[in-house]
Image: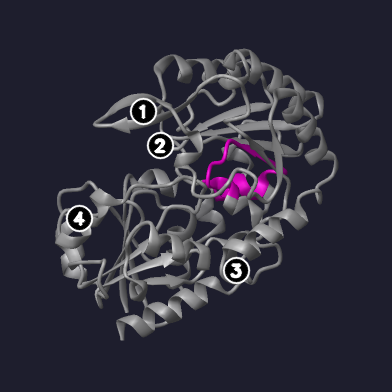
Amino acid sequence: MRICFWSTSFQADNQALASYLSTQTGAQVLVALDDPDRYLQEPVTRLLPFGGTLLDRQAPDTLDAIAAFAPDCLIVDNHLPKRRLAQRLYVLWHGYGWRVDDLSTMKKELRKLVGNVELANRDFRWQAFGERDRAYRIEHSGFAPENVLALGSAYSDLLLPGAPLAPHLDVSAVRAHYRIDLARPTVLLGMTWHHGGALAHWGDDAELHQKLAEHVGGLGANLLIRMHDRHRYERLEVQRMEALASRHAHVQLKFKNDHPDSLIDLLLSSVLISNYSSLLNAFYYTRKPSIHIDPMAHDGPNYRRDLRWGTLRTKKLQDPLASWKLLPDDIGGLRVGSFSELLAAVSQGLSDPACCDAAARAFTERHITLADGGSCERISRALGSWLA
């Protein structure tokens, strides 16, 4: 079978599945992504070899190259091409997460590419992470039940300890890509950008980030800050975070547009802190400690930030929970409601690496289909059966 990935972000589930399929007899894989040269500079290429073809999604001849490849199926994450590139289209959504998403625009685009997806459609499949996610996609997103498959997470195969496809991380092979000392434990700060300033609901954002960096350093650990693309933040916010990293040898700052891959960061890190980014769902597979900053745990108003037509917009929320599909206590780790609780949780996570093992396993069992190390194989079989 010939599979083409149209990737807004070549990471997580589509990265894991594409890499797996590229090693399978009888499968040809082509991936169209933004700036493939930058991706090839990432340390993940040493750890997760890809045997297919990479094309620049923005290059003027890419659509013609895909047409010549004649894929049996196009796999997308959260954005669609302007024209139909294959008879059949398969969606691997970019993370599970807690947030309600509005697919009204995407459904209109899908109708133009493959027809009505609210009815049984032989040319369309949406892969759900588990049965709860499948029910959500049917009831909330409006897809016909026949079009939604609960097949799990391909990414889990790379993150589950001891899984057959889990890569062995040789720290010496990736050390040159980090300015922090990888002999120290690392705390990964991976925040969603939708809530605005990551710690601002507890006080002065810059001051609290400084105190967090000092606390982590005092425990003999690194702070690796992984942010979204630069254009999703205010200029002063970017400058403030860059200044923080420049002041501390144990702090490193990454932006997604500069460093598109996150797999090595997840494998290297001992603890993850986030305000409910879907990065947490992936980290659960590692069974390592995760800390959830509750963005609603304060006395003031709640806000949501979005990017519309290249402009950042901030909206005050009347009912913050209305935008959540999972409750804030449905998690696989520690939950904190104040800055002092955050510092205590960081200390706990570094001193007790197994403190979230049971919670992470329980979340995965509730929400993800068979995170057992065989998800890529299961998805591959399902694709082959559907395309046949």
Q: Secondary structure at mark 4?
A: helix
Q: Which residues are magenta?
A: 262-280
Q: Whole-Å distance between the Cαs marked 1 and 4?
A: 25 Å
The answer to the question of whether label 1 and label 2 lie on touching residues, with beta carbons closer than 8 A, is yes
Query: Which residue is identified by label 2?
Result: 257
Query: Which residue is identified by label 3?
Result: 165
- Dot 4: few (<14), some (14–19), or many (≥20) neighbours within 10 Å? some
Q: Earlier in the sequence, mark 1 or mark 4?
A: 4
Q: Whole-Å distance between the Cαs marked 3 and 1?
A: 34 Å
Q: Nearer the viewer, residue 63 or 159?
A: 159
Please name the amino acid that badge 4 sits on.
Glu
In magenta segment, residue 286? no
Query: Which residue is identified by label 4?
Result: 109
Q: Look at 51% across and 68% down and name the residue there.
A: 131
Give the side of residue 243 with respect to residue 188, left or right: left
Q: Position of residue 29 (x, y in %)?
A: 35, 69
